[in-house]
Amino acid sequence: MKTFDFVIVGSGLTGATMARLLTDLDHRVLVLERRDHIGGNVADRLHSSGIRVGLYGPHYFRTSSDALWSFVNRFARFHPFEAEVRSRVRGRLENWPVGAGYIRRTVGADWSPEFRGVPRNFEEAALSMMPRSIYEDFVRGYTEKQWGAPATALSAALAGRFDVREDDDPRLTPTRKHQGVPADGYTALVENMLSGIPYELNCDYLRMRTVFTARKALIFTGSIDAYYGFQFGALAYRAQKRSTDYHADVEFVQPCVQVNEPDPAVFHIRTIEWKHLLPEAQRRRVRGTVLTRETPCSVASAEETPEYPFPDAANKTLYQRYRELAAQEPTTLICGRLGEYRYYDMDQAIARAQALVRQLLETQPWAAKRPSRLMPAGA
Ligand SMILES: Cc1cc2nc3c(=O)[nH]c(=O)nc-3n(C[C@H](O)[C@H](O)[C@H](O)COP(=O)(O)OP(=O)(O)OC[C@H]3O[C@@H](n4cnc5c(N)ncnc54)[C@H](O)[C@@H]3O)c2cc1C
């Protein structure tokens, strides 16, 4: 039996942040990771061309918090990067999110929303923002491919992830103060976060529960339904199948990092051209380009590679049943995007992990009077 103050299951940003903060406060921490690499969903690898490729999709880091930006900069040098995305509509690449100027050119200036009031589903929410023809061209096909379900069956809250760009700004998230990507990639960032902290790869905690014990708390950042043996049933996730190709004799294939395919007749949903994420000088030194095509799929259970929690009422209710079980285990903390069954951007996942450590320090008997000098302020 191996005993530590904290056993942290999962080496993604949530687990790594908590491991770092607790270690800096002199607790003994062990991290367990069932995959053969650290980093969770943000893991990447260097292609032989010198282009860095995300294993589980592209990750654009952005935050408006100075404290959070300074925290991540402890572990990586970031180079500036502001993502731009285009959608292929009627054979042309148009800005995504859609610009008000595009709507004026194609629909006219005096359109009024087809839906008003409190939206009951995603389609109603989208139709309160844009004319139907724009919704059909840019949004419906993409969303229904992404989720494998009619837009009317999806939560209205999903529409909160995009807007209509009144100023036609082509950047994906222009209002975020700090934006970039780690110059040596996200795996290196997580490696630096875990510096000096023991971790074990290829170790599925759920198959080895009796081997590892925690004196203070078990922190589990895997799927909550898997933790409880799927006793109420499996939570639904969508994921993506990815196919990656190297094109040796092409400089660039697309004008920006991400091209979306909202046309329902096109099987894949988006193409990522990784070279755009490199700093300008590095791009010039690289020969060829690497493209990844992503095609959404369902995962049978959290044993596979779950990516997006399914946004509907049935899964929300099922998650709540598991959360009630978790509330009965005071020395186990089930958290992170899989543990809390919700989509967190990277900055939100890190901020949440920081808040959970702060909460542990404030509420646990062993933590009484512990100094919190090393906690990042105000993040
Ligand atoms: C396709 C996609 C694109 C994204 N793009 C962006 C973006 O551009 N910008 C942005 O800010 N955010 C983005 N995100 C969100 C980002 O990926 C998450 O915020 C982040 O990965 C959350 O980290 P986490 O540690 O909570 O979860 P994870 O990274 O999933 O880490 C959980 C870890 O636990 C491990 N684990 C699970 N079960 C066990 C077990 N039983 N035993 C041992 N280990 C276990 C897993 O293998 C995994 O390594 C994206 C998410 C997705 C799905």
Image (spheres, rainbow, N blue to C red):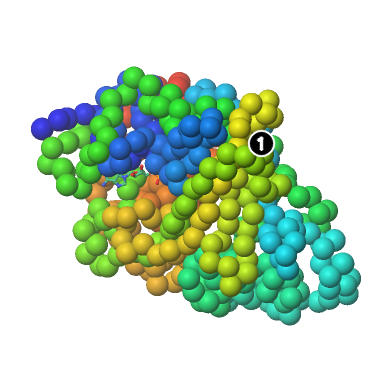
Horizontal arrangement in the rendering, residue 217 relative to residue 81 (left or right) = left
Query: Among all residues in the image, which is located at the extreme front?
Result: 249
The reply to whether residue 53 is in sight is: yes
Instruction: Tell which of 28 and 44 is nearer to you.
Output: 44
Residue pictured at 60% horizontal, 37% vertical = 288
Q: Is residue 49 above or below residue 319?
A: above
The three-letter code of the residue at mark 1 reads Phe
Question: Could you classify mark 1 by the number of other residues whose Cα lies within 10 Å: few (under 14), some (14-19), or many (20 or more)?
Answer: some
Query: Where does the N terminus fall, quadrant-wise?
Result: top left
Quick one: SS at disc 1? loop
Instruction: Tell which of 182 and 274 is nearer to you.
Output: 274
Horizontal arrangement in the rendering, residue 327 relative to residue 42 (left or right) = left
Residue pictured at 49% horizontal, 48% vertical = 244
Q: Is residue 166 above or below residue 69?
A: below
Q: Quadrant of residue 83 in the image?
A: top right
Query: Where does the C terminus fall, quadrant-wise?
Result: top right
- Where is residue 7 shown, x and y percent of the image? 25, 35
- Where is residue 230 shown, x and y percent of the image? 24, 62
Residue pictured at 62% horizontal, 62% vertical = 261
Q: Is residue 28 above or below residue 253?
A: above
- Where is residue 374 shown, x and y percent of the image? 45, 22
Q: Quadrant of residue 377 in the image?
A: top right
Residue pictured at 81% horizontal, 67% vertical = 103
**Residue identified by numbered label 1:** 81
